[in-house]
Image: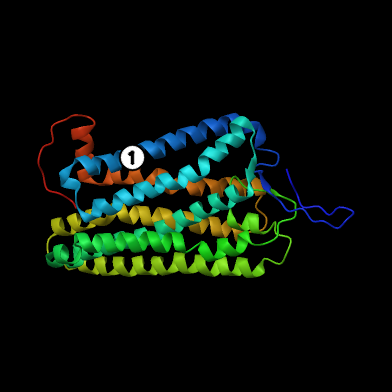
């Protein structure tokens, strides 16, 4: 552990490592149970999301824009947990709670980039559902392969470019001790607050970028679904309305899970009387909630995915029926 200290000659030593201290006291006695839980969550997330990616790859019926975007969502969920869980396991199993300066900011960048990309990707998926329901006759001419490639390229670029300014400024701040991060990974505000100089500009910049990345996609998704709902109500038959709602029900649940869980975390940050252990646990649970929930939602709510599971995993014969996508 290297913290900045000033010796008799006035030389200042900077922090070269951070100590990840997710649980200062009360949770350490549950490290064994926590380790088992982390392994289970990691295996479930990897298995569920890889299964979706492989099913879309092998089943030609799933070679559509909707499942193309779903594959990217599944891959993104794998990136999120892989950026966090391995180091958490190193802490709980091997008691290795030190992380290098560069490793800390690299983990921070990949986590923030993944979160930003997911927000933009959910917006892209909402646009796809909007065109499918509100402009069905023009769907194939609007959502072309070229359009899909353009949308997904913009999504990934915006998502991983979004955190660059804040992380770039943060890494240039002087860190001279203490170096203890009261969190389970290198979360932006918890690391930046360790800086020895005034970090208010970096914090305000990160807050402004975060609000833009959260609220602009949220309102775009909201507008898309308002138009979708109005369009659905104009469908003459009850069966037609049911099929239209089923087409976007899985995506709606994923969107609600993502934004609701993030809202809970931000509310906890604003409440001052919540214990640090509770705040950290809920925030970390939020990081794993959507990667764990997304494959479950799509496997339970989407008929094509369920049919692909029966055919390629359960090896059962599929009875042809109407699609809901």
Residue 67's place in the image compared with 312, above or below, is below
What residue lies at 90% left-to-right and 54% top-to-bottom? Answer: 8
Q: Is residue 186 visible to the viewer in this orientation of the structure?
A: no
Quarter where residue 206 is shown: bottom right
Q: Is residue 293 visible to the viewer in this orientation of the structure?
A: yes
What residue lies at 21% left-to-right and 45% top-to-bottom? Answer: 303
Q: Which residue is identified by label 1?
A: 50
**How did the renderer colour the structure?**
rainbow
What residue lies at 53% left-to-right and 70% top-to-bottom? Answer: 208
* Position of residue 200 measured from the top left corner of the image (x, y, whole percent): 66, 68
* Position of residue 289 measured from the top left corner of the image (x, y, whole percent): 45, 46
What residue lies at 10% left-to-right and 44% top-to-bottom? Answer: 321
* Position of residue 51 measured from the top left corner of the image (x, y, whole percent): 30, 38
* 103 left or right, relative to 222: right
Residue 320's place in the image compared with 227, above or below, is above
Give the camera-side residue of 88 and 262.
Answer: 88
Quarter where residue 312 is shown: top left
Which quadrant: the N terminus? top right
Give the camera-side residue of 149 and 185.
Answer: 149
């Amino acid at each position: 552990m290297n913290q900045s200290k000033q010796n008799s000659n006035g030389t200042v030593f900077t922090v070269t490592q951070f100590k990840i201290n997710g649980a200062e006291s009360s949770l350490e006695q549950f490290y064994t149970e926590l380790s088992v839980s982390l392994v289970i969550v990691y295996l479930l997330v990897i298995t569920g999301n890889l299964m979706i990616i492989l099913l879309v790859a092998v089943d030609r019926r799933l070679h559509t824009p909707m499942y193309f975007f779903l594959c990217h969502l599944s891959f993104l969920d794998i990136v999120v947990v892989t950026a966090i869980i391995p180091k958490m396991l190193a802490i709980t199993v091997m008691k290795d709670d030190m992380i290098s300066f560069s490793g800390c900011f690299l983990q921070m960048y990949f986590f923030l980039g993944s979160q930003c990309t997911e927000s933009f990707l959910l917006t892209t998926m909402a646009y796809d559902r909007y065109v499918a329901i509100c402009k069905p006759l023009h769907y194939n001419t609007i959502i072309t392969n070229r359009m899909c490639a353009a949308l997904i390229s913009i999504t990934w670029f915006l998502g991983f470019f979004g955190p660059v300014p804040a992380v770039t400024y943060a890494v240039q701040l002087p860190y001279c001790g203490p170096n203890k991060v009261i969190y389970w990974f290198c979360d932006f505000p918890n690391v930046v607050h360790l800086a020895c100089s005034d970090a208010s500009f970096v914090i305000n910049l990160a807050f402004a970028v975060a609000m833009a990345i959260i609220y602009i996609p949220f309102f775009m998704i909201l507008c898309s679904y308002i138009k979708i709902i109005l369009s659905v109500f104009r469908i003459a038959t009850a069966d037609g309305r049911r099929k239209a709602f089923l087409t976007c029900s899985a995506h709606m649940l994923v969107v609600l899970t993502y934004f609701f869980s993030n809202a809970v975390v931000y509310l906890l940050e604003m409440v001052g009387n919540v214990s640090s252990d509770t705040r950290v646990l809920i925030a970390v649970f939020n990081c794993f909630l959507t990667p764990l929930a997304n494959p479950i939602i799509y496997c339970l709510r989407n008929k094509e995915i369920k049919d692909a599971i029966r055919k390629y995993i359960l090896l059962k014969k599929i009875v042809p029926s109407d699609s809901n996508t």
